[in-house]
Amino acid sequence: MARRTRSAQLETRTARLKLAVRRKPYTARVAPGIRLGYRRNAGAGSWSVICADGAGGSWLKGFAIADDYEAADGVHVLDFWQSQDRARTLARAGQDGADDSGRPMTVAEAIDRYQIDLQARGGDSRNATRVRRHLPAGLASKTISLITARELRHWRDALFKAGLRPSTVKRISKCLKAALTAVAAHDARITNRDAWGVGLASLPDSEQSRNVILGEDEVRAIVAAAYEISPEFGTMVEVAAVTGGRASQIARLEVRDLQNDRAPRLMMPSSRKGKGVKRITRSPVPITPGLTVKLKAASAGRPEDAPLLLKADGNPWNTSGHSEPFRRIVMQAGLDPSEVTIYSLRHSSITRQLVGGTPIRVVAVTHDTSIQMIEATYSRHIGDHSDALIRRNMLDLSEPPAGNVVPIR
């Protein structure tokens, strides 16, 4: 156990409150190259660690409130002795090259790095944005090596209490876990990986599918309402309904992806989901002759590498530009916009193919997903399809056929 440092100036709250209020911290040496800082404020003071960087400079990082007016809790409010231990924890391992400045990284900085990494690998940078949108300032400024499972569990539960679905909370939590794990892999000082493994465990019911499946008449009503807004928006929505593609995939379609040499189809770009470097490939997805005519007319005269689908103002679609107009057409179709999103067209396409007898592997390839994901998400509809297939060949012994009458299957 590290030897404790004494400081008549800082070790008691009575002594600290006699100090003059100032911005520059009062300090006490707690280890070679490491000093504990105390900033005297008008209210409760704050603790920080000041660590030499080995090049004639130093870095400073605040980490807790001093127990000037409330009892220490060992997490957010620390006494002088607890602060020494915390300062050594932050500065342990010294200049190991984990970070250019040697300063421990915060949660917010980890998310920033995660976003840069996603962009470099061709991933979806919205995974970082999604976490940042729901991260409170207190947790964002927290040093990663000091995060506890209790803090992360409290944040995760607060998302659920705020009205987010368990599946949404799980998605946000997974993104934060990925950001923290990526930083921890390059910083030996971060030894608390169990904190987010335990604190961000999945909520019960987070695996349950809440996909909204639309009937054929409802899909037709939505597409018709989209064409009333504009031909461009109608074509985009019809592509989503016919192919079951994600909005992000449809937005990346190019003119050359429309093929009609043998049978009309679109070469749909793959999504940016999954791990590792996101290499965009293209897979053939059949489309109807009627949609082919509309797409040819919409893209006539444009270069092969130009976006296939454009907005009414001539700009390409992005991943969220459809949200507000889609909400309007859902309401026009008499449906609930809080439940029905453009993703419902994808769910409906997958379900329609499963119930219609299309093999699961073919459905998975066409919709750029996996058999495992389809089985987990659409198991009820797979069961309905299997039930129909089995009953078609089931032997019914309750009413044997009379004479030479044989039922035709």
Image (cartoon, rainbow, N blue to C red):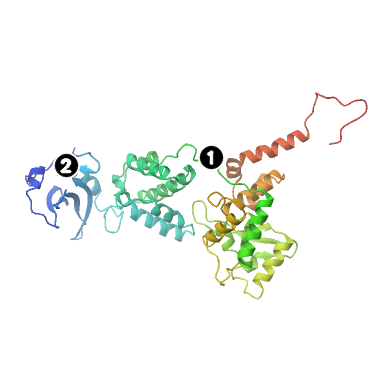
First in sequence: mark 2 vs mark 1:
2
x and y, in percent, of residue 276 in the image: 49, 53
Q: Is residue 161 visible?
A: yes
x and y, in percent, of residue 43 in the image: 16, 50
Front-most of residues 41 and 181: 41
| Label 2 to label 1: alpha-carbon separation | 45 Å
Furthest residue in direction right, as rendered: 404
Mark 2 belongs to which amino acid? Answer: Asp
**Quarter of the image where one finds residue 390:** top right
x and y, in percent, of residue 281 in the image: 59, 59
Name the residue tied to disc 1: 208
How packed is label 2: few (under 14 Cα within 10 Å), some, or many (20 or more)? many
Q: Residue at x 63, y 74 (%)?
A: 302
* Drawn side of residue 161 relative to residue 384, left or right: left
Q: Residue at x 46, y 44 (%)?
A: 170
Front-most of residues 147 and 50: 147
